[in-house]
């Protein structure tokens, strides 16, 4: 891989910290090399912005509070082409506004990180309450086919660690990478352990090579920056490998749209990350992600104590989807329960990969799912 | 000079996509001439545009870094690039619909911030690329495809709008006066802080033919007749000024360089 992977010293002194999830996310961004942040106030993501103002001021980075979320993502994309590792954070209503520009970042292959601290929707919904309702939106929101990366932290530790990974994947694949947090994990305060070093991936540079095409059908081209004399032609219209608009050429459109998808799908194993608990002999499967997975793990332990062979598969990455892990889970278990703070978004996705019965345990009252509710939901259905 | 300008163009992108009689080609030439006369290095310049005919003036014609963005968002993209790399000379070139309707919020906020960039608004008073719909700049009474009985909504005065929002350089000129236009563009591009130039550019295809302009030449003539310079305007009575458009430099405030 041409991408530069290196270990650098952590921006925070190594040690133990007691920190909020949103703040840990900002620290992860700084550690990963983020030097541009644009945002707009929104509950429950504003704490990311507040931390970024303070941290970027320390290290001569750029912070701007824009006039709206469209302005935030737009300036993030502009800054990324000027050479920055750039980020914005928001919640559902802001994601809705940013959606058109996410498609722009996909077609122009612009690395950037978008943090979605999910809150209860639809629309304004309940601003201070957690939800996991944006899982499908970040994947299918923009028109056309979009491959993106989305990671779902379940702890303050992962708010930090997965934000670093999101920056790395954004550079590796040249795309927008999402952190699918929620109000609960965003406002959670717990221990964060910072190690001596972090692994950071830097942008692939190769002057003279086309910035929007590769010989391979699934390649990621190098990315020059503004001001380097590359005469960059960046456009959201269909373009050839040098960036010239080709809006009526079927071959160019076919090659571009195929590559934008294959560059992720063919290398999805580099991103897909899951964790298994008690799955070796499990008959009853539970699949969960984000904050809900904490309750699901407790629920599985309780069910084990009660004699039920339950096991948990936790999705750490959401997109690209962990298809092979689901196929394996389906073969192992008689039934799979999916507790999530939405009306069954990931439960529905599972049905693409397994014929094992999937039972959705949705909760959308603006409160987190508790272990007892998952236990009860499984017991009710297994009776 | 001609040779110099050809070196600033991606000639493989020719012919331009503009209709016969469109004013945007004159504007394109004036922008390049202004930069050539200022002796700016195109390699240190970034041209940002939105969606619409005018957005195609820099992209893909200019041999420099160009960023052809979403509809209305050019200024917001330009803000990010300029803030991260203040060495870039950033010029936004886009149309009236793009900058003042869908992108109006970014326009006023960039002016308020005194963002160090030049915004050139090619105002043809119509949505040309999509088939001649009414714009926020279409004069009262004009026929468009969405105002078949004449436009009932008063248009924006874009220069007053950005002046009110805090722009430190504001000017208006028409493509019917390419030499004064080049002079103004030179001042705007070399201005430090937020500079805005409204460039009146005729659209014979979608505005002219529906509004009793028989030829593109008639539209240029009409611009020549209705534009009056800020110098000449002094001493003219309100009756004489009826239906006239003020052109020239409208605001030029000293600035410490604007935000970058």
Image: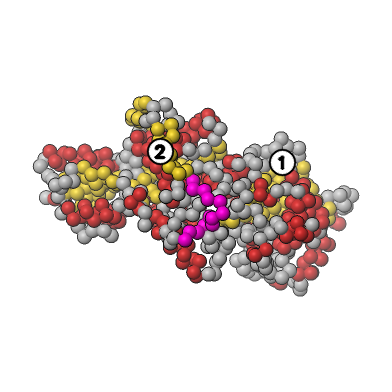
Q: Nearer the viewer, residue B232 or B216?
A: B216
Where does residue A229 sit, x and y in percent of width and height?
62, 50
- Number of other residues with Cα within 10 Å of mark 1, as a class: few under 14, some 14 to 19, many 20 or more: many
How many discs mark residues in the rendered view?
2
Q: Residue at x 87, y 52 (%)?
A: B232
Vertical relation: A181 (above or below) A326: above
Query: Is B42 one of the magenta-colored residues?
Result: no
Mark 2 or 1, closer to the camera: 2
Residue found 50% across the figure and 52% down from its top = A222
Assess whether residue A214 is covered by the magenta stretch.
Answer: yes
Distance in Å between CA atoms under marks 2 and 1: 40 Å
Q: Secondary structure at mark 2?
A: strand
At a point 25% along the width and 53% down the height, the residue shown is: A326
Q: Which mark is residue A108?
A: none
Q: Going 53% across and 29% down the picture, which residue do you hit?
A: A58
Residue position for label 1? B192
B82 is higher (above) or lower (below) than B132 = above
Asked if the residues shown at circle 2 and circle 1 are in contact, with their CB atoms under 8 angstroms apart, the answer is no
Q: How is the image coloured?
A: secondary structure
Q: Chain of mark 2?
A: A
Dominant secondary structure of the residues highlighted in magenta in the image: loop
User: Which label is found at residue A199?
Assistant: 2
Res. A130 in view? no
Describe the element under mark 1 as helix, strand or loop. Answer: loop
Q: Which residues are magenta?
A: A203-215
In the displayed structure image, the side of residue B117 where residue A200 appears, left or right = left
Residue A252 shows up from this direction:
yes
Percent position of residue B93, x then y: 66, 54
């Amino acid at each position: 891989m041409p991408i530069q992977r290196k270990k650098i010293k952590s921006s925070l002194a190594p040690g133990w910290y007691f920190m909020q999830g949103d703040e840990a996310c900002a620290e992860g961004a700084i550690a990963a090399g983020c030097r541009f942040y644009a945002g707009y106030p929104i509950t429950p993501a504003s704490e990311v912005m507040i931390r970024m103002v303070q941290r970027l001021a320390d290290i001569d980075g750029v912070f701007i509070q824009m006039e709206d979320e469209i302005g935030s993502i737009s300036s993030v994309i502009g800054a990324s082409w000027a050479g920055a590792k750039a980020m914005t954070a928001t919640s559902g209503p802001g994601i809705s506004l940013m959606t058109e520009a996410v498609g722009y970042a996909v077609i122009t292959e612009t690395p950037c990180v978008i943090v979605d601290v999910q809150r209860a929707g639809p629309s304004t919904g309940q601003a201070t309450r957690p939800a996991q309702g944006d899982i499908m939106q970040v994947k299918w929101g923009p028109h056309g086919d979009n491959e993106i990366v989305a990671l779902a932290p379940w702890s303050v530790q992962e708010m930090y660690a997965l934000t670093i990974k999101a920056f790395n994947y954004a550079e590796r694949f040249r795309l927008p990478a999402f952190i699918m947090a929620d109000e609960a994990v965003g406002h959670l305060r717990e221990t964060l352990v910072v190690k001596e070093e972090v692994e950071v991936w830097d942008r692939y540079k190769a002057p003279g090579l086309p910035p929007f095409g590769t010989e391979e059908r699934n390649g990621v081209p190098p990315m020059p920056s503004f001001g380097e004399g590359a005469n960059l032609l960046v456009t959201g219209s269909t373009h050839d490998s040098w960036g010239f608009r080709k809006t009526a050429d079927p071959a160019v459109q076919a090659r571009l749209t195929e590559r934008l998808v294959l560059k992720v799908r063919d290398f999805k194993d580099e991103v897909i990350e899951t964790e298994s608990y008690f799955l070796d002999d499990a008959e009853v499967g539970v699949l969960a992600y984000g904050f809900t997975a904490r309750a699901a793990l407790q629920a599985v332990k309780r069910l084990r104590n009660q004699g039920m062979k339950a096991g948990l598969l936790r999705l750490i990455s959401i997109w690209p989807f962990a298809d092979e892990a689901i196929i394996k889970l389906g073969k192992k278990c008689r039934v799979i329960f999916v507790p999530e703070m939405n009306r069954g978004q990931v439960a529905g996705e599972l049905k693409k990969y397994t014929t094992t019965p999937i039972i959705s345990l949705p909760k959308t009252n603006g409160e987190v799912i508790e272990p007892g509710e998952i236990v009860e939901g499984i017991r009710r259905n297994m009776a | 000079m001609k040779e110099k300008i050809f070196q600033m163009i991606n000639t493989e992108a020719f012919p331009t996509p503009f209709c016969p009689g469109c004013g945007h080609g004159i504007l394109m030439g004036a922008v390049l001439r202004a930069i050539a006369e200022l002796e700016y290095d195109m390699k240190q310049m970034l041209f940002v545009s939105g969606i619409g005919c005018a957005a195609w003036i820099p992209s893909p014609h200019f041999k420099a870094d160009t960023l052809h963005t979403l509809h209305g968002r050019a200024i917001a993209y330009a803000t990010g690039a300029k803030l991260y790399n203040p060495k870039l000379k950033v010029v936004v070139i886009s149309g009236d619909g793009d900058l003042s309707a869908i992108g109006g919020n970014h326009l006023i906020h960039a002016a308020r911030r005194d963002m160090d960039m030049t915004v050139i608004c090619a105002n043809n008073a119509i949505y040309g690329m999509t088939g001649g719909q009414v714009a926020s700049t279409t004069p009262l009474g004009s026929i468009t495809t969405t105002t078949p009985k004449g436009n009932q909504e008063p248009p924006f005065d874009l220069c007053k709008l950005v002046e009110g929002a805090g722009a430190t350089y504001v000017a208006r000129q028409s493509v019917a006066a390419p030499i004064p236009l080049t002079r103004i563009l030179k001042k705007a591009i070399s201005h430090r802080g937020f500079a805005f130039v409204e460039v009146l550019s005729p659209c014979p295809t979608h505005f002219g033919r529906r509004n009793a302009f028989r030829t593109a030449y008639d539209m240029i003539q009409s611009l020549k007749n209705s534009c009056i310079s800020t110098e000449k305007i002094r001493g003219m009575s309100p009756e004489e000024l009826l239906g006239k458009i003020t052109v020239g430099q409208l605001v030029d405030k000293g600035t410490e360089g604007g935000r970058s």
